[in-house]
Image: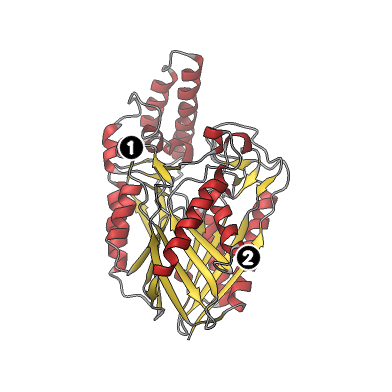
Amino acid sequence: MFKLGCAEAEFKVPLFVELYGYGPYAGRKNIGTFEPLYCRAYSFNDGNNRAMILYSDICCIDDLYARELRAKIATELHLNPESVAFVATHTHSGPAIGSSVQESVGIPNAALQDTWKRLMFETAVKAFYDEEEIANADAGSAIPDQPLGKNRVEPETNITDPAIRYMRFKRADGSVKLMIHNYAGHGISDSGKLTKYVSSDWMGKINRFIKEEKLADFPLYLQGAAGDQNVRFSCYLSGDPESSRKLADEYISCLKRDIPNAAEAKLDGISFILKTVEFPTIKQTAEELRQDEASFRSKGETPQEKEYWGVIADRLAEMAIKLEQGENLDSLHDLQIIRIGDAEFIFIPGELFIGPGIEMLNGADGKYPFLSTLSNGNGSYLFDENCAKKYPSIFSKNLGWGFYEIYTYMYRHKFKYRDDIAQFLIDNIRKLEKYTWN
């Protein structure tokens, strides 16, 4: 007998808390709520094993907080810690939730972070005790009439996510308790005039529409490989605060059109694996970092260029100090797979580019694969090798898309990833799929 439990709570953000996203500037403080944020929890039980997915309308999941909460939830509910996953929608209009302050993205509010942790724990417990029998499930891939996103790094080829992947969990009476849906696109539709408002962006609107139109009692959005994917509609470009609604309308119409074609998805067992791995980086000494710092201090012709390079130099100087004090600047993150019957959920801790993301999905063992990025940790941009080859140096001429995603490592006080970071992830996910899971 397969059972499913769901729970949710609104995550309210006080006025004037700083929001996270849209790059380096100060004073982006909340002045109201445009689309509410939620914390949600989902408990899957096949009678022998349980798995839980914990969802938040925030930009990124923090590695340390995910590990802390995973241990607490697993202890409280007697779960295997490897069966608990944390996902974020990547809205750029939520508060910073992180164990360290990162330059350029928003200063965390300690009291609000405690609120988030409490809500995550409470919704997990509620979902656990909400479990009810699920009779069957179905799944499919809905093809949009036109891409909902655009490739900001490779606009010429414009490779975007080809489909909205979805799965529905249904009761014996045919009602749908949960609809999981998965697509890749940055949460930046509610931008421009709305940057000082809290918003769950287009993802939150879709989740709300799923409930309002009774497509399911609970929605679960999983952000796909959106490292190089912007959405087609944004308030910044159009000045229209209804941009996210327009995108959501297209998305929902596409889902509705495809649902009659959904195929049976078996719910014959839950399995899982989680492994902490060191991502491949280019390691430097403190002396080398200081040499880079000195080079950047001398760059730039205009005041704006001098400021740009000066900020990078400041971060590199901080990295050198950390190394001199014995800190480790390597990148260790958690990779995870959860299987629920025919469905395979792959959790990646960062913003993977769409090309490697499609390759990961196409090579997955599960009949219905889902790729969830920004999950279990914040590994920043996970670029593909072609992009890395285009911009082999931080002194490469382009300072826009493509260059930006590669050269943000100093803002995290971590070494730069090697060019083969995406292939490393694909290879390691393939290895995890071969394990015998509990």
Q: Residue at x 53, y 51 (%)?
A: 248
Q: Regarding mark 2 in the picture, which secondary structure is present there?
A: strand
Picture coordinates of residue 195, whole percent (x, y): 61, 37
10 Å crowding of disc 2: few (<14), some (14-19), many (20+)? many
Determine the image quadrant of residue 73.
bottom right
Q: Residue at x 54, y 49 (%)?
A: 202
Q: Residue at x 31, y 57 (%)?
A: 360
- Residue 280: which numbered mark, if any? none
Q: Residue at x 68, y 41 (%)?
A: 30
Labels 2 and 1: the sequence-earlier one: 2
Determine the image quadrant of residue 324.
top left
Q: Regarding mark 1 in the picture, which secondary structure is present there?
A: loop
Q: Nearer the viewer, residue 413 or 260?
A: 260
Left-right relation of 241 to 267: right
Q: Circle 1 is placed at which residue position?
A: 154
Q: Nearer the viewer, residue 95 or 67?
A: 95
Could one spot residue 202 in this view of the protein? yes
Q: Nearer the viewer, residue 432 or 264?
A: 264
Mark pair 2, 1: CA separation? 38 Å
Q: Residue furthest top?
A: 301
Picture coordinates of residue 302, whole percent (x, y): 47, 13
Q: Nearer the viewer, residue 243 or 391?
A: 243
Give the mark toward the camera: 2 or 1. 1
Could one spot residue 345 in this view of the protein? no
Query: Are dots 2 and 1 in contact, CB under 8 Å?
Result: no
Left-right relation of 315 to 198: left
Residue type of the residue flagged with mark 1: Glu
Residue type of the residue flagged with mark 2: Glu
Judge whether 233 appears above or below 257 on screen.
above
Q: Circle 2 is placed at which residue position?
A: 8
Judge whether 400 appears above or below 14 on screen.
above
Quarter in which the C terminus is drawn: bottom left
